[in-house]
Amino acid sequence: MEHIRAIQELVDEHKESMPTGVVTAVMEECQKTYQSLPKLYKLTWTTVDSHAHVEHCHNGEDIAHIKLSHKTQTLIVEAVDHPHHLRMCACAMPHHGMMLASWLKLSMPRTMSIGEDSMVIVHSIVPYEPRKRAREE
């Protein structure tokens, strides 16, 4: 994206010495290129899984030990309409670099259940702006 902005700034600096038609055409092509780039978002979510283990006691009473495990991740994903050719649930899509565009309209945080023993908590979805890191000298 930075290279597109650099072209636009260069054209702006020299537009007085260039024909108006060329300036307009270059700026329109830059805008088309910029708009064709995928809209990326930074998705932060936590997946929570549960596991129950029943311990059989000698006195006849069984005790259930329930454990929850969680994992928080931040993923860079593209907002897409549900691709019908992919047979996956919406909560599996972020692991493939996608999320439903409809998630952008949801209030956060949002909790979604996945089956009987798992759930997802979506903490935030914010636009992703790639930044280059400065090289170490």
Image (tube, rainbow, N blue to C red):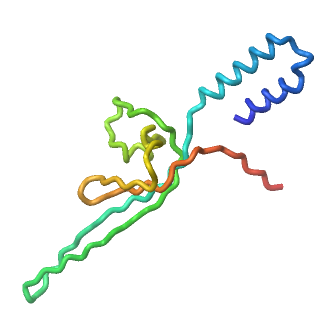
On screen, residue 51 above or below 39? below
Residue furthest right in the image = 17
Residue 17 placement, left or right of 117: right
In the rendered picture of this protein, how many numbered marks are placed on residues?
A: 0
What residue is at 49 percent from the left and 57 percent from the top? 73
Q: Residue at x 65, y 28 (%)?
A: 34
> Where the C terminus falls, by quadrant?
bottom right
The single residue placed furthest to the bottom in the displayed view is 59
In the image, residue 8 lies at what x, y percent? 78, 27
Q: State which quadrant residue 68 falls in.
A: bottom left
The part of the image, by quadrant, that contains residue 59 is bottom left
Q: Work out whether 23 lies above or below 6.
A: above
Q: Assign the N terminus to one quadrant of the image.
A: top right
* Residue found at x 13% / y 85%: 57
Outermost residue, left direction? 60
Q: Position of residue 101 (x, y in %)?
A: 45, 37
- x%, y% of residue 120? 37, 56
Which residue is more in the foreground, 122 or 49? 122
> Does 103 sit left or right of 29 as displayed?
left
Q: Quadrant of residue 15?
A: top right
Q: Is residue 62 above or below residue 83?
A: below
Residue at 51% x, 43% y: name it. 77
Q: Position of residue 78 (x, y in %)?
A: 51, 39
